[in-house]
Image: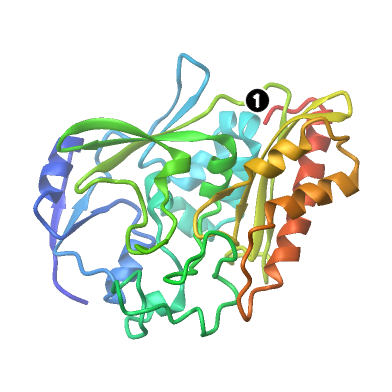
C-alpha cells in the first residue's frame, strides 16, 4: 500500500481546506475506501478524516422531511424509530446490506459514494474505463454475471451500482446537501449518480473538494406501505442480483400512487417512472397489470452474455415488492 498523509478535521471548512489542492479522499467509515487503497485502485496522497464533524444526527425538518447527517452509521439509521415507522423501505434495505460489523462502521455519505464491485475495476490490471479512461471495458466480453447491469449501460462500462440504501432513497426521493470551497448547495438525489455514457470515471455530481454534509428524505406519503425485496445468490453478505424498493398508497383496493426503484440491474439506483405511471388506478391484486408494469420497467434493458437472467428476475422482484407494499398500505402502515 502506498504512503499517504492523514489529516483529522473538526469542521466542514477545515475538512474542505485540507482536501483542496491534493489528490485526497474524505474518510469516514472507510468500508470501501480502505479496501480500494489496499488494492492500489485508489491512490490518495491524503486522507481527510471527517468523523469528528458534527454530522452524526438524524433530525426532523419543519416541512415534514427527515435530515440525515453524513456520518450517521447505517445501523443507527436502520434502527431509528422514525425510519422504521415512516421509511420502512429504507430500514429494510440497510439491514439487507453487508454485515452487522460493516453496518456499524459504514456511513450515510459513504454509502452514497460507494464504488462499484466490478472485479475488473478492482483487480488493478484489466482494462477498465472507470479506473483508467480510454483503456476499454473488460466486462462486456468477460464474465458479467453478478455485479453487472442491464439498465443504463454503455459501450464503456456495465458495472452495477452496488448500494441497497441508495435504491431505497431513490424510491423515497431525497436531496443531497454538499459544502465546498464555493459554499453550499443541494443536489437532487436522482441527479447525484451519473450514468457511465462516455465518461464512466465520472460517477457523481460533486464538484472538486465538495463534501456531503446531509441527505434529506422527502416527506413520507400518507397512508403508504413500503418494502425492499432483494434477490441474491445467498441470504447474507451478498450484493443484489435484482432488488426492488416499492412504496404504494391505496384508494380502497386500487393503487393511488406508487414509487419503484431497482438495484442490482442498473448502473445507478434506477427509478421506474414509466412503470409507476402505469400502476395508477390499478387494482393492487391484479397480477397481470402488475406484471405489465414490471415489463415496462425493464423494456430498455440490454442483456449481456451471463446476466440476461436478471431481466425476468427483476420483473419478479417488482411484482412481489408491489404486492408486499400494498398489503402493508392496506393494513394502515405508513411508508
Q: Residue at x 56, y 24 (%)?
A: 219
Q: Is residue 28 left or right of residue 268?
A: left
Along the line of sight, the residue nearer the viewer: 22 or 269: 269
Q: How is the image coloured?
A: rainbow
**Left or right for 153, reference 6:** right
Quadrant in which the N terminus appears: bottom left
Please say whether residue 11 is visible from this viewpoint.
no
31 over 257 or under it: above or below: below
Indicate the position of residue 46 as horizontal and vertical percent values.
15, 60
Q: Measuring from the top left, give residue 4's x and y in whole percent.
A: 14, 66
Query: Which of 197 and 247 lies nearest the eye of the viewer?
Result: 197
Read off the residue under disc 1. 221
Which picture quadrant has residue 300? bottom right
Disc 1 packing (10 Å; few <14; some 14–19; many ≥20): some
At a point 90% along the width and 42% down the height, the residue shown is 286
Q: Quadrant of residue 307?
A: bottom right
User: Against 315, is 1 above or below?
Assistant: below
Q: Position of residue 67 (x, y in %)?
A: 43, 28
The residue furthest top is 62
Closer to us: 254 or 230: 254
Position of residue 227 in the picture relative to residue 13 (left or right): right
Q: Nearer the viewer, residue 272 or 319?
A: 272
Amino acid at each position: 500500500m502506498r504512503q499517504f498523509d492523514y489529516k483529522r478535521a473538526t469542521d466542514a471548512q477545515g475538512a474542505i481546506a485540507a482536501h483542496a489542492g491534493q489528490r485526497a479522499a474524505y474518510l469516514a467509515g472507510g468500508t470501501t475506501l480502505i479496501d480500494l487503497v489496499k488494492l492500489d485502485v485508489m491512490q490518495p496522497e491524503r486522507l481527510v478524516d471527517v468523523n469528528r464533524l458534527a454530522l452524526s444526527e438524524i433530525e426532523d425538518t419543519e416541512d415534514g422531511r427527515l435530515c440525515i447527517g453524513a456520518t450517521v452509521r447505517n445501523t443507527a439509521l436502520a434502527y431509528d424509530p422514525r425510519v422504521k415507522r415512516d421509511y420502512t423501505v429504507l430500514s429494510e434495505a440497510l439491514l439487507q446490506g453487508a454485515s452487522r460489523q460493516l453496518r456499524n462502521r459504514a456511513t450515510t455519505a459513504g454509502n452514497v459514494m460507494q464504488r462499484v464491485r466490478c472485479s475488473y475495476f478492482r483487480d488493478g490490471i484489466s482494462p477498465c474505463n472507470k479506473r483508467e479512461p480510454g483503456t476499454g471495458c473488460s466486462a462486456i466480453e468477460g464474465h458479467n454475471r453478478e455485479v453487472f447491469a442491464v439498465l443504463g449501460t454503455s459501450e464503456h462500462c456495465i458495472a452495477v451500482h452496488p448500494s441497497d440504501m441508495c435504491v431505497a432513497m431513490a424510491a423515497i426521493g431525497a436531496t443531497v446537501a454538499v459544502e465546498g470551497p464555493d459554499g453550499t448547495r443541494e443536489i437532487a438525489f436522482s441527479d447525484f449518480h451519473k450514468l457511465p455514457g462516455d465518461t464512466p470515471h465520472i460517477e457523481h455530481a460533486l464538484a472538486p473538494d465538495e463534501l456531503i454534509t446531509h441527505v434529506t428524505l422527502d416527506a413520507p406519503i400518507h397512508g403508504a406501505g413500503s418494502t425492499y425485496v432483494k434477490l441474491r445468490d445467498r441470504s447474507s453478505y451478498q450484493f443484489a442480483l435484482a432488488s426492488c424498493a416499492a412504496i404504494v398508497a391505496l384508494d380502497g383496493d386500487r393503487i393511488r400512487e406508487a414509487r419503484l426503484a431497482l438495484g442490482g440491474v442498473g448502473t445507478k439506483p434506477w427509478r421506474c417512472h414509466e412503470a409507476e405511471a402505469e400502476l395508477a388506478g390499478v387494482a393492487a391484486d391484479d397480477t397481470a397489470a402488475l406484471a405489465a408494469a414490471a415489463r415496462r420497467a425493464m423494456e430498455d434493458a440490454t442483456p449481456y452474455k451471463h446476466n440476461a437472467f436478471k431481466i425476468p428476475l427483476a420483473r419478479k422482484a417488482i411484482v412481489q415488492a408491489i404486492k408486499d407494499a400494498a398489503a402493508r398500505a392496506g393494513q394502515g402502515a405508513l411508508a
